[in-house]
Amino acid sequence: MKQRVMLAQAMLGNPKVVLLDEPTAGLDPEERIRLRGYINDFSRNRITLITTHITSDVENIADNIILMNKGRIVCAESAEDFIHGCGAANLEEAYIIRLHENERI
C-alpha cells in the first residue's frame, strides 16, 4: 500500500519529470507486476527516472537505461542497445558485463 501511495504522490500535479526510488521494493510478484503497469502507463507522457537494482523492473518498464557506477555514468542507451551492444542475452547479463568493463578502465 505504501508503494501505491508513493506513486499517487508522484503523480499529483501532473509533473513533467518524476523520480522513483526503488518503486517495487518489498512487493510480492503480483503487486510488483501491477505497479509496473501503473508506472508504464503514467510514464507515457513524461520523463520518469527510476533507480533500482531489480533488473526485471527495468526490463519491463525502461525504454532507455543509464548505468552508473560510483557516481559516474558508465553508459546511456536504449534498453535494446544496452543489452545487445555488449553481446548479452538479457539485461542482468548486460549489467554485469558493462559494470565489469568499466572497472577495467
Image: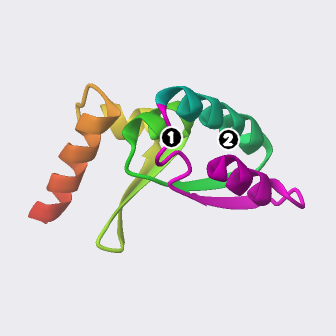
Q: Residue at x 26, y 25 (%)?
A: 89
Residue 73 image position (x, y, % from top left):
38, 66
Q: Which residue is mark 2?
A: 39
Residue 34 image position (x, y, % from top left):
63, 30
Residue 56 placement, left or right of 70: right
Farthest right residue in view: 13
> Relative to the observer, which residue lies in front, 71 or 1?
1
Give the residues in magenta: 1-28
Colour treatment of the image = rainbow
Q: Which residue is mark 1?
A: 27
Q: Few, some or many C-alpha atoms within 10 Å of disc 1 (few <14, some 14-19, many ≥20)?
A: some
Residue 78 placement, left or right of 45: left
Q: Amino acid at mark 2?
A: Ile
Q: Residue at x 39, y 44 (%)?
A: 54
Farthest left residue in view: 104
> Relative to the observer, which residue lies in front, 46 or 41?
41
Q: How many marks?
A: 2
Q: Amino acid at mark 1?
A: Leu
Instruction: Indicate whether 69 appears above or below 60.
Output: below
SS label for mark 1 = loop
Instruction: Indicate whether 84 appears above or below 39.
Output: above
Instruction: Indicate whether 4 appears above or below 6.
Output: above
Q: Quadrant of the C terminus?
A: bottom left
Q: Residue at x 66, y 46 (%)?
A: 1
Name the image quarter holding residue 85: top left
Residue 51 image position (x, y, % from top left):
49, 57
Question: CA–CA distance between discs 1 and 2?
Answer: 14 Å
